[in-house]
Amino acid sequence: MSTSTTAQIEGPSAFPQAAPLELRHVCKRYAGQREPAIPDLSLEVVAGEVCVLVGPSGSGKTTAMRLVNRMIPLTSGDILLGGRSVLEREPNELRREIGYVIQQVGLFPHQTVSDNIATVPRLLGWDKQRTATRVHELLELIGMDPDDVGPRYPAQLSGGQRQRVGVARALAADPPLMLMDEPFGAIDPITRARLQDEFLRLQERVRKTIVFVTHDIDEAIMMGHKIAILRQGGQLAQYDTPAEILTNPADEFVAEFVGADRALKRLGLATLAEVELLAPNGLKPGANKVALDTTVRDALSQLLAAGGEPLTVFDEREQVAGIVTLELLGGLLGNGSLTAGEPASSGGQGGEPAT
Ligand SMILES: Nc1ncnc2c1ncn2[C@@H]1O[C@H](COP(=O)(O)OP(=O)(O)OP(=O)(O)O)[C@@H](O)[C@H]1O
Ligand SMILES: [Mg+2]
């Protein structure tokens, strides 16, 4: 476990830990239930990556999370964290190593924000100074003023602020794995978009292994390196990158789940930098400009708004990078030439939710 004594956290070194997670033929049958909630689930999450579990209500997402940190017992199969079976671990000790953010945040109402964040460090017996330093550092990391917010009680925060504190609390002991069960589920759309953005930036710095549950396919596309789509009955319908799921849905269920606009969503994962633009010569540079780091989806929408007039693409040094036209982008939709590319960023930052 590392402690950084600097208030300002620089780069990922302050949070060096991330462990791979593997579910091997996991089965969970609740007592008294005829059908298992999860019959046979296998998946691997690479250390430092975000795996999003998505699927309809009752498809076993929360069950899968609770099996990982042993809040409920496995019926059969195994789960390995950092190559080691969780079944070999003492459950309380295991839970201190896994950050858990639940839907209603679950902050302790009678404890201050600082005390809430200090929960696991206290359980681990950290001394006062180390704990206080850590709490201070985490509040700064989530963009909150430690002196202002630290002494407040959860009821004195907005929903979005409580959610951030929940994330800080889960990060407190620098866990190699974070489980986040619909962390932004109860938040209004505008705050939610901001929290999603913040989350991606935070993840770039802390690089935790994260299992993230959501109902929302747009959130999944934006957050996940990989998306696991569960269907009713706890079966894994597809486990793949957002780009691959959008391009090649495994079956009807997945296609319907990701939505009829999946081709458009796919365009939200790529930027113009990944497109072979038309050479500027020959075409008169139009009055309409667009930046090279614009998503293909946004560029398409800008083209439509401009009545189909070509857009001149500028790079970050204000140099003309090329021309983009409706025909060019329309062609990409048809020929699948964006399918080979990676998402716009590791976390799919370019994948704006549909508006
Ligand atoms: N303690 C329990 N006892 C019996 N059955 C349970 C229990 N907890 C969950 N289940 C059942 O297991 C299945 C999966 O539930 P789970 O909570 O994992 O779904 P979920 O995908 O998280 O759903 P939601 O999106 O609504 O949160 C459901 O059919 C549910 O009714
Ligand atoms: Mg659930």
Image (cartoon, grey):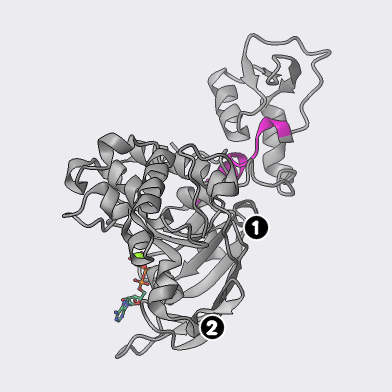
The residue sitting at 71% across, 39% down in the picture is 332
The residue sitting at 52% across, 62% down in the picture is 176
Position of residue 139 relative to residue 308, above or below, is below
| Quarter of the view holding residue 67 | bottom left
Mark 2 and ligand 1: say if the CB distance to the nearest ligand atom is below 8 Å.
Answer: no
Position of residue 200 relative to residue 220, above or below, is above
Look at the image and tell me whether residue 230 can be seen.
Answer: yes
The mark found on residue 78 in the picture is 2
Viewer-closest of 18 and 224: 18
Viewer-closest of 175 and 227: 175
Give the crowd class for mark 2: few <14, some 14-19, many >=20 residues within 10 Å: many
State the extent of the magenta-drawn residues as a range.
Answer: 259-273
State the separation of the CA atoms marked 1 and 2: 30 Å
Position of residue 192 relative to residue 116, above or below, is above
Position of residue 212 relative to residue 199, above or below, is below
Q: Quadrant of the C terminus?
A: top left
The residue sitting at 41% across, 49% down in the picture is 134
Q: Would residue 179 be found to the left or right of residue 159 on screen? A: right
**Callout 1: SS:** loop
Three-letter amino acid code of the residue under disc 1: Asn
The residue sitting at 56% across, 23% down in the picture is 302
Q: Is residue 272 magenta?
A: yes
Residue to which mark 1 is pinned: 248
Q: Is residue 336 magenta?
A: no
Q: Would residue 297 be found to the left or right of residue 281 on screen? A: left
**Callout 2: SS:** strand
